[in-house]
Amino acid sequence: MRGMGAESLMFVDAKILNCSEPEYREHPGLSYSQWKYWDSPEFFEGAFVRKPPIYEIDETADMLFGTNVHAEFLEGKECHQVPDWALTSDGKRYGKKWDAFKAGHPAIDCLSAKEIVTVQGLRASIESQPKIANLLWGEGESEVKIAALHNDTTIPVRGMLDKVRRTGTDYLIADMKVSAIDPCHRFGVSKRIWDFRYYMQAACYVDLATAVYGKPPLDYLFVWCHKEPPYLVRAMPLEPAAIELGRRHNDEALKEISRRHFVGDWTGEGHNDVQETVIDIPDWAYQAEQPTFRDFIGDYQWAAK
């Protein structure tokens, strides 16, 4: 047990949604992928409050490929390569033939040759590691869709967990990430978790699961899949402290969204301001250069800062 639970429930009135993914996307409620933009209120308002929205979040090729990998490994579907006739002479997905093929086929049938090789490489990597294979393909449920209410604001929320892995009466949560970051590069993985706010996603999913199952998971693990040779796959539990920070940031985000809805103000920090909002470089940049910087500034009370 790694201490996944919170002192009080973040979410209440939780229920599992028995619906398709398109139906889930239309279900009322905010997801982590929306409220993670809470500190850019002008964008949040334009993308998620206005009807119709004035800003769109385009699905990138990497996002689409990640969705297809999830479908192959978690939903039992099979990825297929685009046939040669639908490609250009140099093998690119472009032109009228490609447009016609794409219009009549789901995304999982539209992978490039390189993407198919990546899927095959990742599958071989998982199959060579029985513990990881058991985590993803052992007893439990995949693509678990949960809806609930935020306890303090009653904002409807929702989330879709990649894998709830059953272990007797307990369970784990596995979250598959397909990334250009090698899982052996721990700093790169940590930075990606921070930059993409995966720690907030982890906290959201832990708290949704706790609300619907009545107890917290034993652990929350990223199954990190490197999409370049040799297609390394590693299972890495997220530190409980990171989940607790994500929990606090989720709570702050939903409370701030609720407040802005109430007052009708979506202007962000620095609006109509020319001097008060001071910007700086990250703290770690100073820490990385501390010895050299200390020598440069002499007795500038560095140690006291």
Image: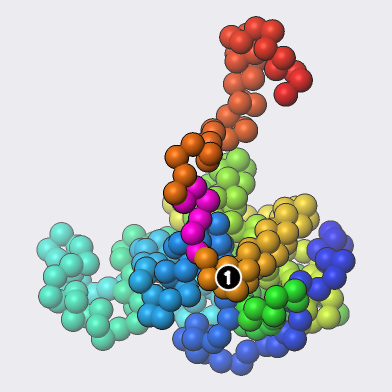
Does residue 17 appear in this view? yes
Q: Nearer the viewer, residue 192 or 177?
A: 192
* Name of the residue lying farthest toward the bottom: 18
Q: Amino acid at mark 1?
A: Val
Q: Is residue 108 within the magenta segment?
A: no
What are the residue bounds of the magenta stretch? 266-271
Q: Secondary structure at mark 1?
A: helix
* 300 left or right, relative to 265: right
| 269 is higher (above) or lower (below) than 78 | above
Q: Nearer the viewer, residue 98 or 187?
A: 187
Q: Which residue is rendered at x = 62% and y = 33% of the image?
A: 283
Quadrant assignment, res 98: bottom left
Q: Quadrant of the C terminus?
A: top right
Q: How is the image coloured?
A: rainbow
Principal SS element in the magenta part? loop
Q: Which residue is rendered at x = 14% and y = 70% of the image?
A: 95
Q: Residue 219, how many percent across, how many down?
A: 77, 64
Q: Residue 49, how many percent across, how many down?
A: 48, 75
Q: Which residue is rendered at x = 84% and y = 76% of the image?
A: 215
Q: Which residue is mark 1?
A: 263
Quadrant assignment, res 50: bottom left
Q: Residue 104, how many percent across, how many down?
A: 26, 86
Does residue 131 appear in this view? no
Q: Neighbour class for label 1 at 10 Å: few (<14), some, many (≥20)?
A: few
